[in-house]
Amino acid sequence: MKCDKHTMLLYAVTDRAWTGPMTLLQQAEAALQGGVTCLQLREKHLEDDAFLAEAREMAALCRRYRVPFIVNDRVDIALACGADGVHVGQEDMEVSAVRRMVGDKLMVGVSAHTVEEAVRAARGGADYLGLGAVFSTSTKADAGAMSRDTLKAICQAVDLPKVAIGGISAKNILELSGSGVDGVAVVSAIFGAPDPRRAAQDLAELSRRMVSGQ
């Protein structure tokens, strides 16, 4: 599945900390029904067998909705479950090493916090970039907020699809208008919402407004 700017419009990242009445799979399907354009499975504490089983379920779900499915960090899990891509951070594997492992089988996304990191990721074979944290976030306590100047500088320096991430909600998403990003990645704004489908619908519309306002 191809990665393009439209893929970045509303990029949902799972977090099982918010599960309650709904399972994570049910939350993910509700988000897809609401208009999510890309779904990333992020698991930090599952055993490998459980992670792979869950990833296969998520991959099948995303195929039904014709939405790209990304696995966070784990290249092995991404390849084994039939994912469309893998996303790595600066503290994980070098993007060039990831690209050698996956060839053209998977899209490769990379987190970037500076122009230098973004340029290096692009040269190493990244298909898209995750930029942030653009606002303070509880998901990653050590991620300081990226300045708007840095966000715009990265968008101007690198010609890849780019998604902003970090502390984004319906209340602040329009503040990103004019930055150059192609969409937003959210965690709690969807998975922490009582109605993930409605939250995704609202965020998708706001993201379209944000992008068109550039």
Image (cartoon, rainbow, N blue to C red):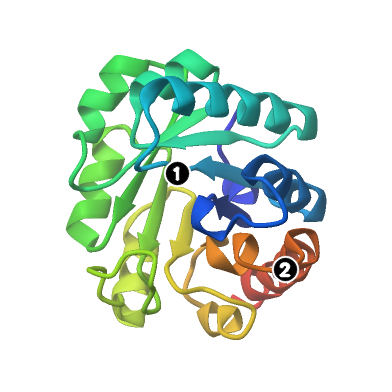
Which quarter of the figure is the N terminus placed in? Answer: top right
In the picture, measured across the screen, residue 63 lies left or right of residue 189, that is: right
Task: Please give the name of the residue rendered at 29% of the width and 74% of the height, measured from the top-left corner.
Answer: 150
User: Looking at the rendering, which quadrant does residue 120 occupy?
Assistant: top left
Amino acid on which the number 1 mark rests in the picture: Arg
Task: Please give the name of the residue rendered at 69% of the width and 33% of the height, measured from the top-left corner.
Answer: 62
Can you identify the residue that label 1 sits on? 42
Can you identify the residue that label 2 sits on? 194
- Tell which of 64 and 194 is nearer to you: 194
State yes or no: discs 1 and 2 in contact (Cβ < 8 Å).
Answer: no
Find residue 169 and report its horizontal and vertical position in percent: 58, 76
Circle 1 SS class: loop
Residue 87 in sight from this viewpoint: yes
- Tell which of 112 and 160 is nearer to you: 112
- Tell which of 159 and 124 is nearer to you: 124
Find residue 159 and report its horizontal and vertical position in percent: 41, 50
Dot 1 alpha-carbon crowd within 10 angstroms: few under 14, some 14 to 19, many 20 or more:
many
Mark seen at residue 143: none
Find residue 17 and report its horizontal and vertical position in percent: 50, 57
Find residue 109 and report its horizontal and vertical position in percent: 40, 41
Task: Please give the name of the residue rendered at 67% of the width and 45% of the height, measured from the top-left corner.
Answer: 23
